Amino acid sequence: MLNDSPSISIPRRHLYEQVWSQPMTLLARQYGISDVALAKICRTLGIPCPGRGYWRRKQTGKVVKQLPLPPSADPVKQSATISKRNLAQSGNHLSLQAKEKIQSELTGEQKIEVPDRLVSPHKLLSGRRPQLRSPNVDRYGAMWSGGLRDLNLRVSPSSLQRALRILNTLFHALESRGYQLTVEGGTTPSLCVCIEGEPIQFGLEERFRREAHPDQHNDRLPAWQRERYAYVPTDRLVLKIIEWGAKGFRKVWTDGKTAKVETCLNEFIVGLLKVAHVVKAERLQREHEHGERHEAERRQRAEEERRKKEEARRNYLIKEAEAWTQARNIRTYVTAFQEKFIARYGDIQAGSQVDQWMSWACRHADALDPLTGIESQSSPA
């Protein structure tokens, strides 16, 4: 790492020299940011960057041209402060083995070459030959039959053979590196590669140019039959990673003026590796947060249950105390009544109405009193 602090200030000239001394992906990793973020910083400072295929041509001994740093009098654009954000921290999830694989891909140790013709068709392609021979073409001019849809392949008929060669080469390269290819999904199967236990979708498509349709203003056709636009294939292919997670990481490789998708397969595999590791880290983080929420909810339910039991015990205690007080008051009242009656009328005759009432009152007090027969009662839970 160039610097372990959260941010670093680098002069414009220094950054320019670094950008032309090593690939952007390697330099960005040293700063703890993505190559996309570093390229954006260079554009802001007006620093030219090597084009696609520059490092590959330089490694093979071809003549390459380094663009000069244009002068800038803007004092704000004389240096850049590079800050490590959450995206940078995602690099910490890369294992040493993954970093070595990335280094191998970027230094050309396993350079991928796409042949001029389809050789040794992969089983994912050979199993779909009938569909590939007569695929459906949608209203946009793209071949989009069931077999192609499963492979996330959407190109015009004129680009099909080239697209198949690219995919076939990529399929074999991924499997040679130990990654499993699958077509996963229920009602809408989709091409995936399994890296670090994470199924990452990817695909290949062609860019189409939209033009005014000849029938747009055809008065001989009813309005509902007129097509507004026609879509023309551009022969520009786009190799992309179809993944909603790992935001900020590069997921699209497109044909350019100087380099084609065929020359970017190693970089694409690096992109798959990075995205897979970040997706795994994000999944583990979600699972951790889910576990924490689940544990918090469990503790909350346990606390609520404890609170309800405690409240029930208090209510039971209050109810018994009130019943005991009523029983004691009744007995006190019966005793006072008996004393008052005897003082005024003499002894109470056994079996008299007064004697029967006093016996009934005492029985009622005993029924209310929770301490009556306590020896045979069990304590409340």
Image: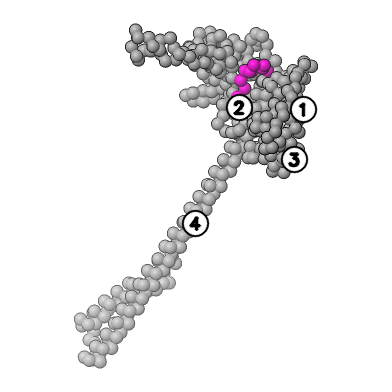
Q: Is residue 314 above or below residue 37?
A: below
Q: Is residue 166 at least partly visible in the picture?
A: yes
* Residue underneath mark 4: 303
Q: Tell me the kind of residue under disc 2.
A: Lys
Residue placed most toward the observer, 318 or 49: 49
Q: Nearer the viewer, mark 4 or mark 2?
A: 2
Indicate left or right for 181 with 219 as reference: right
Viewport quadrant of the C terminus: bottom left
In contact (CB < 8 Å): disc 4 and disc 3: no
Mark in front: 2 vs 1: 1
In the rendered image, residue 270 lying in the magenta stretch gets the answer no
- For disc 3, the marked residue is 3
- As shown in the figure, which amino acid type bears the numbered disc 1? Ser
- Please give the range of residues in magenta: 250-263
Residue wearing tag 2: 251
Q: Reading the chain from its start, which is encountered first: label 1 or label 4?
A: 1
**Residue 111 sits in quarter:** top right
Q: Earlier in the sequence, mark 4 or mark 2?
A: 2
